[in-house]
Image: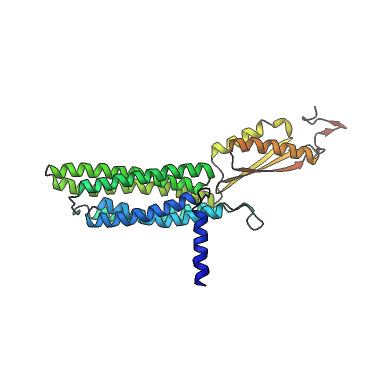
Amino acid sequence: MTFNAVSYFFQTWRKRLKPTSPAFIPAMALIACLVLAIMGIVIGTTSESLIVETNGWIAAVEIINASLFIMAVERSSKTADFQFNYGYGKYESLAILSSSGLLSIVGIYVLIEAIQTFGSPSTTSNFWFLATYSFITFLIIRTMTVLMKKAAKKHRVGVLNFDADLWEADSWMELGVVANLIIGGVLHHYGYFNVAKFLDSGSAIILLGYTVSIPLRHGKNALAQVLDKTLPEEIQMGILSSIVERFDSFCEFKAVHTRQSGRDIFIEIDLILPFDWTLEQSRELEKDLADDLKKKYPTSIMRLYAQPCPRDCFRDGECFCPLKQ
């Protein structure tokens, strides 16, 4: 039993570590978070630097996030089936929602702790060592940001966009840490010890506030997807413009229904068509609309619901149908 479990673990990770796999970059992110968490907590604690230690704890939380994202990417990549007609994209939204909640709770907790200890911050004298370490960390995080953005664009997976934003926020935060430590080193060198101590805590509070804003924003969008909120107005207008461009191909426009499941955008259009149209003609209109929407929204999946007109355009044996004039 144990052997089977170990074998399954290695087979799963072998697939994830293939560069062509959508889970490859999230797997690399998990490894990077593990390294940064251990080093950040150990170095920050031993050097008595609140801001470096805070970075380590944020990386530790993101280990859980990276694990969630790997599972979300793997599940959302599955195609729609009989059980889930709209695919498995909601796993992405749930992962983003869970991650946002976790990051927000931890971030707010650490923020409160930093504010409470602001009056008596710990001191450090290893500014230049910490600045060097933080700059190397910045390079690692920035590299992961670029890779994550490329992966998000390539695989069109929403959770990777969220992860890319988190890594980008972390990179700017790390750059702020580097600047903070350099300034702290200069202040310490010239004897402004108290100013240097308070700068460490003050910077930690500011950077934490910025970091918390990212999961809050994405969490709001993820909640909208879970609740099947209508797509943004600009997308709705884009869909309507495609319909209006073909106004001479249908009798009446009834409604358009939209929803998003992960990367997939589902569009359902209700139209009234001439009563004597064949299935082939309806199919041609549907294909034309679907192709146009696909150009605008590459992950869109369109369905046309056609109803025949009630023939109210016939009066006194004469047809007044605008499509037949």
Q: Can residue 300 be seen in the rendering of this structure?
A: yes
The image position of residue 19, as x and y in percent, is: 50, 48
Which residue is situated farthest in the right direction here?
317
Coloration of the structure image: rainbow
Q: Is residue 232 left or right of residue 138?
A: right
- Say which quadrant the C terminus sits in: top right
The image position of residue 285, as x and y in percent, is: 72, 36
The image position of residue 284, as x and y in percent, is: 74, 37
Number of labels in the image equals 0
The residue at 41%/49% (across/down) is: 215
The residue at 54%/41% (across/down) is: 232
Which residue is situated farthest in the left direction here?
191
Q: Is residue 241 left or right of residue 71?
A: right
Which residue is situated farthest in the top direction here?
325
The image position of residue 113, as x and y in percent, is: 27, 56
Q: Is residue 171 left or right of residue 121?
A: right
Q: Quadrant of residue 175?
A: top left
Q: Can residue 105 be seen in the rendering of this structure?
A: no
